[in-house]
Image (cartoon, grey):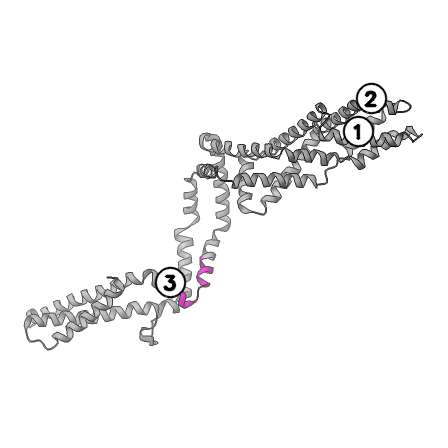
Amino acid sequence: MKVTYMAPLSLLAAMIGFILTCRAQNETLKFARAFFEAAMVGGLADWFAVVALFRHPMNLPIPHTSILKKNRKKITERIVDMLQNKWLTKEAISKKITTYDFSLEVAKFIESEKESSEIKDFVGSLINEVIARVKNSNINFLKFIERINTEISKINLLEPALGAVEKNFDKIRILILTEAEHWLIKPEAGYILKEKIRSVILNYAQKYEMVKTAVEFGETIGVLNYEKITNELVTILLKEISDAKDDAGHEICIQLEKIFKSLLDKLKTNEKLEALPSIIFAMVATNLNIPEVLFKELESSREDIENFIYGLVYSYAEALKANESVSGRFNSWAREQISNFVNNNHEEIGKIVHDNIESINDDDLVNQIEEKVGEDLQYIRINGAIVGGIVGTIIYALHRFVLN
């Protein structure tokens, strides 16, 4: 039987017992009457006390009743103070943080997601974002095109120009692609690509707190190495250029060949061959979008990049478990970040609790508290009846056998 029903039944039993024994003359029944009488008084008193916590007994505005509603503000303040300054103090949280192995938990999380597509999808979307941002950025490829024009202008393209172009198209193709290689291996090219990749990742991380934390973690322990990503990107681009140098059927080569054929057709009827270098430059600048071709090839190699980064993430997850140096650095970083957050936002604990309590109206708050502790409080009524009955019996016995 639920305690909720036992409490009123105990009071009812005391009342019935008192009524049945109130006129008793038998000595044993007089003891029973004393017990039931005191139990009834004790049960009623404790019923009043329990009910007075939550509401007015019998809806009568008796002073010092409905205690929770009347003292709500004071109770809320004391709960907030207890949580913030007694239980969840900065020192208590910091002590717990220093013993928590964040690296192991992160490693377990990454491994648990190994069969899931979420991390791989995130890596894929990140690569797409990087490619799109770099492609639509203001990276200055003009110097690269100007360098091509400078090299072409050095070549004697007067009378033998048309024949030379027709006979040496492969050499010209190699020359252009070689210049592209030269640009890509320059330090400034790597710096530009690295900064753009870093900017894209950080901007994306700002949108999601979890991603931001992951990026900061990656930068701290070296998982997210922009230098390595840039080097991998340059390696892929150089590979595509190298393939184009070796394969005349490559898409880059096809585009180059189309441009040169168009140019030769025009030059056949043009007597001002000395203008050929500037014409070539104009054609290259307007018709051959080298960045677009390179990014197209990069996009086609997206899966390779994705697998590289995907493998990198899991290799560092293994390092977090097996390498004490890596896990130690990560734990130090995580503890420092969380400690700083707690120190700067500790008062938010009280504000959150306070705001949540204040968002509940009086009746709902009382109902919620009563739902959680009301059943336990019923034992007060039961104990009040039992203890009252025992005390009443003892008092009767004293009067009967001692005082008289």
> Could you tell which of marks 2 and 3 lies nearer the N-terminus?
2
Disc marking residue 167: 2
**Mark seen at residue 349:** none
Give the crowd class for mark 1: few <14, some 14-19, many >=20 residues within 10 Å.
Answer: many
The residue that disc 3 covers is 368
Query: Which residues fall within the magenta stretch?
Result: 353-366
Label drawn at residue 148: 1
Tell me if residue 395 comes above or below residue 129 in the rendering.
Answer: below
Q: For the N terminus, which image quadrant?
A: bottom left
Residue at horizontal 40%, vertical 66%?
364
- Does the stretch in magenta take in 244? no
In primary-sequence order, the first of circles 3 and 1 is 1
Left or right of 235, for residue 390: left
Q: How far apart are labels 3 and 1 at the CA level?
A: 77 Å
Q: Is the magenta stretch mostly helix, strand or loop?
A: helix
Q: Where is residue 89 in the image (x, y as percent from the top left)?
A: 42, 50
* Camera-nearest residue between 24 and 184: 184
The three-letter amino acid code for the residue at tag 3 is Gln
Estimate the x, y position of residue 342 in percent, counting from the top left: 48, 48
Task: Tell me the quarter of the picture where residue 301 sits.
Answer: top right
47 vs 110, nearest the viewer: 110
Distance from disc 2 to disc 1, alpha carbons, whole Å, reads 20 Å
Badge 2 local density, few (<14 within 10 Å), some, or many (20+)? few
Q: Position of residue 51 (x, y in %)?
A: 31, 69
Q: Is mark 1 on a helix, strand or loop?
A: helix
Q: Which of marks 3 and 1 is in front?
A: 1
Distance Cα–Cα, label 2 vs label 3: 90 Å
**Of pointers 2 and 1, the one earlier in the residue sequence:** 1
**How crowded is the residue under tag 3: few (<14 C-alpha within 10 Å), some, or many (20+)?**
few
Residue extending furthest right?
A: 271
Q: Which residue is drawn at 56% across and 47% down?
A: 208
